[in-house]
Each structure stands twice: as C-alpha cells, then as structure tokens.
Image (tube, rainbow, N blue to C red):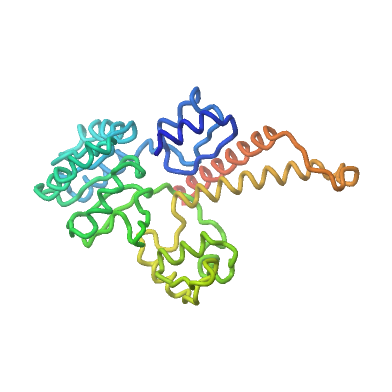
Amino acid sequence: MHSIIFILLLMFYVFQLYYGHFQSLLNAHEQFPHLYQMSPKDTSLALAMVSLMVHLKWNWVGMIISDDDDGIQFLSEWRKEVQRNIVCLAFVTIISTDTIIYFKMLNKYYNQIMTSSAKAVVVNGNKESHLKWNFILWQSLDIWRIWVSVSQFDMITVGGDFLLKSPHGTLIFSHQHSEVSGFKQFLQRVHPSNYSTEISLASLWWTYFKCSLPSSNCNKLKYCSTETLLKWLFRTPSGMAMSDTNYNIYNAVFSVAHSLHEVLLQQVDTWSNNAGKELEFDPWKVVCLTLSSIYLIEMMFLKESIRSKCM
C-alpha cells in the first residue's frame, strides 16, 4: 500500500503535508521535493527506551520490528545504546513486508514470543505494514506481555480495541506537545446528531461505540449517550489527551488555514473591484506561508518544552 502511495506522490507535483508517523523514505527531498512531514523524527527513541529498561531493571526483553528502513534503523540505534547498558535482547522478530512470506512465518512470529521468558517486548516500525496484522490476530490469544512502543501503535482497530492491548499494561512513548485549547470540551460535545450530513462520523461512531444505524438513513444514528464516548476514551492509554497523529493533523490544518487567511487579508483592498469573480492567488505563496506557520509552531513547541524543563 505504501509503495503505491509513494508512486502517486511522485506523479503529482503539488505541495503535501504528511501527518502520519515519520517515514525515513519520505524524507528524501530529491524524491519528494514538495512533501513536508509534520511528525518529527524520533532521534532519541532508542535511548529513551533503553533508559526506561535500565531504570526498571528489565535486562531481558524481546523486540518486534517491521522489515523496512524504519524498523532496521531503530534496531541499529538500539544496539548502539545497549552497548553502554546491561540490556539484552531475548529475541528479535522482523516482520516481513512480503505477504506470502509473512503468512508462512506467522506461527514462527507467535512462537518466538510465547517460548521466550522475556515479559517485556519492544514494538517499533511501520504500523501500516504487516506488523499491525500480527496484533489484530493475536488479540484473542491472551499474550501476557508488557508492550513498549510509540504512539502510532496506540490506535483502534475495526473492533474498537487497541493494537497493543495487554492485561499486563502498555507503555507508550509520544512526543511532548502543549495542550490544544478546547479539545476536551469538543470531545464532550461531539455527537453524530450534530453532524447529520457527515457519513464518515456516523460510520466511525457505529464502528467504535456499537450504536445502531437506522435502515432508512445511513447519515443519522439512533441516539447514543455521550457517556459511551467518555467511557471509551478513558479506556485508552492516552485518555482524553490528543494523540500524536491528531496533533499533527491539527497543526497541518491550522497552518494551511492560517496561510489562506493571510492571503485573503492581502487582497482586501481589491475585493470591491473583483466582486463576483473567482478568487485567484499564487498557490506557492500559500505554501511559503504554510511552511512559515509550521516553523512558528515548532518554535512555540521548543519554547514550551524548554520552559517546562526550567520550571
């Protein structure tokens, strides 16, 4: 799937903001000159995880990674960090990107975890690879392990549960970011009945909260209490906090909206002369303003991070 997306990105020379987890492949400016990743690179993830293992005195852990640039690079960084610390890998499961090989190896992947004495397992790599399907298939098998991973794996499946659900607990690493004003209040008020024309929201509500769809109109749902939403939210590892992916989406939309607003303000003087005409402006001007907005957001985050450490 990702290879198809990459090909499409090459075909269309338009400015793109990628809000998913950081992808090393997408960072190649020669291949994707018009693409900007909202998510920062995890430059210290291996160090942070190894430090946690040392602090908790977990010196025998397992690892599951995807067989791609991100997974292999993480394993390399991990091995550099453990040279200075007493943390050993009980096993390393590398999930193949080839579908035929993946299904042939499925039982072996499972047995590597179950036959190991390691109670903590580190998970990292591309969530949209076959790595995701392992956890969907394993959900009903009661694998009693502590999962240690990143926020991109803290995602809901079609059944409404989390990929890394575990009775022993899950430790999620995420980027530090300031709280978005009004986000919790929005979650407390949101309901499909307020957005009756949004089929996607109605489908989402049915998928995750099991509210029934009326047969006559798929746009609307039978009444489902907001308490259902709040109970579900508090089941999640992140609670009512905004996830990394949602935060990246918010910043991307905010940056583009802010840029369009600036372009419109610059044309205020000519509005009376162009009344009724189609609005025209240089799209690359919006691009430049958008990148400037993103830079300002990053600087605000940096200042907030420094301030929190100094307090």
Residue 27, given in percent of the width and then of the height, sits at 46, 30
Question: Looking at the picture, does residue 308 appear above or below residue 280?
Answer: below
Residue at 18% x, 58% y is 141
- For residue 231, what is the image quadrant? bottom left
Residue at 54% x, 39% y is 17
Residue 190, given in percent of the width and then of the height, sits at 54, 68
Residue 298, given in percent of the width and then of the height, sits at 54, 41
Q: How many marks do you count on the picture?
A: 0
Q: Nearer the viewer, residue 284 or 215?
A: 215
Q: Nearer the viewer, residue 245 or 216?
A: 216
- For residue 23, what is the image quadrant? top left
Q: Is residue 295 left or right of residue 6?
A: right
Question: Looking at the picture, does residue 265 appear above or below residue 183?
Answer: above
Q: Nearer the viewer, residue 160 or 169?
A: 160
Question: Looking at the picture, does residue 259 appear above or below residue 203?
Answer: above
In the rendered image, the residue lying farthest to the front is 216
Q: Is residue 290 left or right of residue 37?
A: right
Q: Is residue 139 left or right of residue 44?
A: left
Q: Is residue 276 left or right of residue 45?
A: right
Residue at 36% x, 53% y is 154
Question: Looking at the picture, does residue 213 appear above or below residue 270?
Answer: below
Residue 161, given in percent of the width and then of the height, sits at 33, 61
In the rendered image, the residue lying farthest to the right is 273
In the rendered image, the residue lying farthest to the top is 30
Quadrant of the rendering where the N terminus is positioned: top left
